[in-house]
Image (cartoon, grey):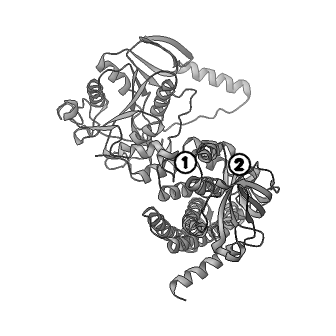
């Protein structure tokens, strides 16, 4: 079976700092990593490879330095990779990103299963996985934490809900977005990392022409949304201390809740 | 062609491992003083023990520079984990790899690469350290092999090892020209080990004495051919010193990182102590020494990778980087002041661990003599 894993290189921080003038992320001096949810998607694919005959291909899009994420994925055990890197892809919103990834997947040939992380820690949109599925007209299951069974034409997975989980059977090919499950992502092997750095490593670097798209369809030009301003919201919560005896405090509190239609 | 830089990629990978798997438990491991088996197995699964060996022979296909990068990053987390790894990658397996038979490779080398067996190196004796010509552990040729008799001390990983590479004297009259390396499995009759030493620093690194009494080994267990022992030693000692320098760089970085963090947090007289010039001077010296240590160390590693004689450069690197580590650890305890004296903080561990680096790879008193001689006196 052919498994494609979508991965993204992101800054290794949950406390993203913004340039107050430009509103852009400050990336200088911040270490980059494979997006944590994507690592779980890759781990799930590699675990499947241990029990099924599968070829795992990593697909990523980013500036040239994002090749490190691809190399690391190869180090973990991916068989091959496609890296989409072209100035034309820069500035893509989730729509243009999904479109580009979708076109690349179409260009990659037959696929049985696409795995993606639920969301990236830099954008937190959780849109790219579902949009890729929509573009390719594939069924999708989000928030998957356990791939229980994989058959020739369907997969059985568990997806997390707020108050429990669902067990879903889904026909293949399909796209799953993955959240952390039982398997901790493995560390890369040194020998595989070094192989990934070689020119003859099975990593293909594709540009816009390679996936038959025009520059108007991708990147900033192909984006449907534009970021007008980025800012950190200010939280200005004010607490009220209720004073007095227990009965008085409870009376005041319940009156307040009723008054604000909270109960 | 877009490809990753192997040195940056390996460094980044090991750094992440150190931050996630070693630093959070370093203090606890050091307090327990036990062999860090779980971490050792994880390092084996990453294939790090084979970093210096070719890929088609069970290694990872790297080189001395990558080996030093790994040692440096691990030492930033815990010097003892780095020293255990360093032993397994280099001294414990090097002669077995180069001179062992195919059967020995299958039985010992490849399991060592997988972390299933531990190899170590027996050189120092109770009465012979840097003066290697004075070693008395004797390999006597007998019918079908050799009889080994003698005592080795300061054997890093000795209590955990499955096999030893032992420097022996084959002909005392020849002194240095008579030395050679012999392979001795631990389970051979006549091999015994002392209880592990109680040491000041690198407390998870097990160290002991190993005694050999009439140990018979087959002749193919003589690793270096007659007359090649000294050359083999001179070849490996440059790499040992470059590696020790890399350990010292890791320790310097740890001491400096903690010092900076503390200096930016600790408030005295209404300002963080990092605002005081005397604290800034300490940090400036640490940062400068660190850069100089890197230049010396990675220059010598690159020379080794290029097949050049790097003994002088590696000796200077080991001497300079270790002295800089001693200074950084000392200054770290001063910046932490009272807390530098507390066993709850890291500064004391850095201070203790520097002592391991001072003698490993040659005492600085001997190394300075060598450097002065090379300089022309």
Element assignment for label 2: loop
Disc 2 crowd, CA 10 A, few/some/many (<14, 14-19, 20+): some
Spot the residue most to the bottom.
B377
Residue A161's disc number = none
The residue nearer to you, when weighing B158 against B247, is B158
Give the residue at mark 1. Answer: B48
The residue nearer to you, when weighing A90 against A43, is A43
Give the residue at mark 2. Answer: B162
Residue B137 left/right relative to B80: right
Q: Which sits earlier in the primary sequence, circle 1 or circle 2?
A: 1
Q: Residue at x 51, y 87 (%)?
A: B376
Element assignment for label 1: helix
Q: Give coordinates of residue B254: x percent, y percent.
A: 59, 59
Residue A244 left/right relative to A52: right
Q: Residue at x 65, y 42 (%)?
A: B116
Q: Give coordinates of residue B168: x percent, y percent.
A: 70, 65
Q: Is residue B197 visible?
A: no
Disc 1 crowd, CA 10 A, few/some/many (<14, 14-19, 20+): many
């Amino acid at each position: 079976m052919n498994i494609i894993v979508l991965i993204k290189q992101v800054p290794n921080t949950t406390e993203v700092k913004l340039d107050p003038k430009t509103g852009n992320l400050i990336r200088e001096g911040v270490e980059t990593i494979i997006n944590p949810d994507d690592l779980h998607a890759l781990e799930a694919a590699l675990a499947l490879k241990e029990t099924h005959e599968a070829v795992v291909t990593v697909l990523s899009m980013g500036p040239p330095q994002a090749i490190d994420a691809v190399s690391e994925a190869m180090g973990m055990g991916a068989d091959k990779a496609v890296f989409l890197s072209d100035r034309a892809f820069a500035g893509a919103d989730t729509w243009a990103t999904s479109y580009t990834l979708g076109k690349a997947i179409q260009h990659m040939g037959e696929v049985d299963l696409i795995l993606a992380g639920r969301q990236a820690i830099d954008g937190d949109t959780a849109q790219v996985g579902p949009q890729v599925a929509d573009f390719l007209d594939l069924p999708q299951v989000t928030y998957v934490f356990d791939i229980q069974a994989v058959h020739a034409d369907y997969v059985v997975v568990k997806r997390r809900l707020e108050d429990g989980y669902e067990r879903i059977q889904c026909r293949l090919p399909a796209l799953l977005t993955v959240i952390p499950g039982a398997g901790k992502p493995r560390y890369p092997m040194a020998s595989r990392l070094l192989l990934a750095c070689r020119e003859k490593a099975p990593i293909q670097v594709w540009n816009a022409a390679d996936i038959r798209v025009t520059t108007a369809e991708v990147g900033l030009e192909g984006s449907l949304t534009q970021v007008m301003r980025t800012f950190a919201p200010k939280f200005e919560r004010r607490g009220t201390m209720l004073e007095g005896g227990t009965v008085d405090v409870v009376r005041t509190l319940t009156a307040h809740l009723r008054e604000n239609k909270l109960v | 062609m877009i490809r990753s830089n192997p040195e940056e990629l390996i460094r980044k990978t090991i750094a992440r491992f150190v931050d996630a798997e070693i630093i959070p438990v370093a203090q606890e491991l050091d307090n327990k003083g036990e062999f860090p088996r779980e971490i050792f197995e994880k390092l084996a699964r990453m294939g790090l023990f084979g970093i210096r060996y070719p890929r088609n022979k069970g290694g990872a296909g790297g080189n001395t520079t990558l080996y030093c990068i790994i040692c440096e990053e691990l030492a930033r987390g815990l010097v003892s984990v780095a020293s255990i790894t360093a032993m397994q990658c280099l001294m414990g397996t090097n002669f077995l790899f180069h001179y062992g038979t195919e059967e020995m490779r299958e039985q010992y080398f490849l399991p060592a690469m997988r972390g299933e067996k531990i190899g170590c190196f027996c050189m120092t004796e109770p009465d012979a350290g840097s003066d290697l010509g004075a070693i008395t552990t004797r390999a006597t040729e007998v019918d079908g092999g050799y009889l080994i008799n003698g005592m080795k001390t300061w054997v890093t990983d000795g209590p955990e090892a499955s096999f030893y590479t032992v420097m022996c004297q084959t002909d005392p009259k020849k002194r240095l020209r008579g030395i050679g390396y012999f392979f001795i499995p631990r389970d051979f009759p006549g091999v015994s080990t002392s209880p592990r030493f109680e040491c000041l620093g690198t407390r998870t690194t097990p160290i002991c004495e190993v005694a050999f009494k009439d140990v018979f080994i087959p002749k193919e267990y003589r690793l270096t051919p007659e007359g090649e022992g000294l050359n083999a030693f001179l070849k490996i000692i440059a790499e040992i010193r470059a590696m020790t320098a890399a350990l010292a760089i890791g320790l310097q970085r740890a001491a400096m990182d903690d010092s900076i963090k503390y200096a930016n947090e600790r408030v005295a007289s209404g300002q963080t102590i990092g605002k005081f010039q005397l604290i800034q001077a300490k940090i400036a010296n640490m940062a400068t020494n660190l850069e100089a240590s890197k230049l010396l160390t990675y220059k010598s590693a690159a020379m080794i990778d290029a097949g050049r004689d790097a003994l002088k450069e590696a000796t200077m690197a080991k001497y300079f980087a270790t002295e800089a580590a001693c200074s950084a650890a000392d200054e770290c305890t001063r910046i932490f002041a009272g807390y530098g004296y507390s066993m709850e903080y890291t500064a004391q561990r850095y201070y203790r661990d520097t002592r391991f680096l001072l003698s490993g790879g040659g005492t600085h008193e001997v190394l300075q003599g060598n450097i002065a001689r090379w300089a022309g006196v």
